[in-house]
Image (cartoon, grey):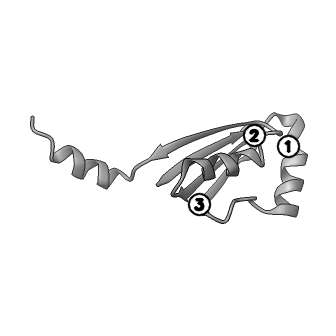
Amino acid sequence: MLFMTVYSYPPSNRDEVIKRRLQKGPQLPDKVKLLGEWSYIASGKVFRLIEATEAAEVFKAAYAWSDLGTVESYPVIEVEQVMGMVSAFDR
């Protein structure tokens, strides 16, 4: 299952976020695969697209960063897959 995770951190934690990322990497459990990662430094946000088979693994991935800011995780589905499901609905 795919999840878009948004990490938001205050400007006061920016240097610690950068330091931890450089020293420890993305800090993901073995069962979580990082598919993409983007940062908007000016707003203190990091966006990650991850793949996990269990929601508990998504929680573990978020926990490693939750002391520096807030974490939001959303299950997502590729648009083409959604369109395939929607086209099967009776109207």
Q: Secondary structure at mark 3?
A: strand
Q: Are marks 3 and 2 in contact (CB under 8 Å)?
A: no
The x and y percentages for residue 67 are: 83, 39
First-in-chain label (3 vs 1): 1
Discs 1, 2 touching: Cβ within 8 Å: yes
Q: Quick one: label 1 or label 2, which is nearer the N terminus?
A: 1
Instruction: State left or right for residue 6 relative to residue 82.
Output: right
Please, what secondary structure does the residue beneath circle 1 have? helix
Q: Which residue is at 87% across, 39% downward? A: 13
- Total marks shown come to 3
Looking at the image, is mark 3 or mark 2 nearer the viewer?
3
Query: How far apart are the alpha carbons under marks 1 and 2?
Result: 7 Å
Left or right: residue 91 compared with residue 36: left
Q: Which residue is mark 1?
A: 14
Q: Nearer the viewer, residue 42 or 6?
A: 6
Report the residue marked by disc 3: 36
Rendered residue at 90%/47% (across/down): 15
* Residue type beneath disc 3: Gly
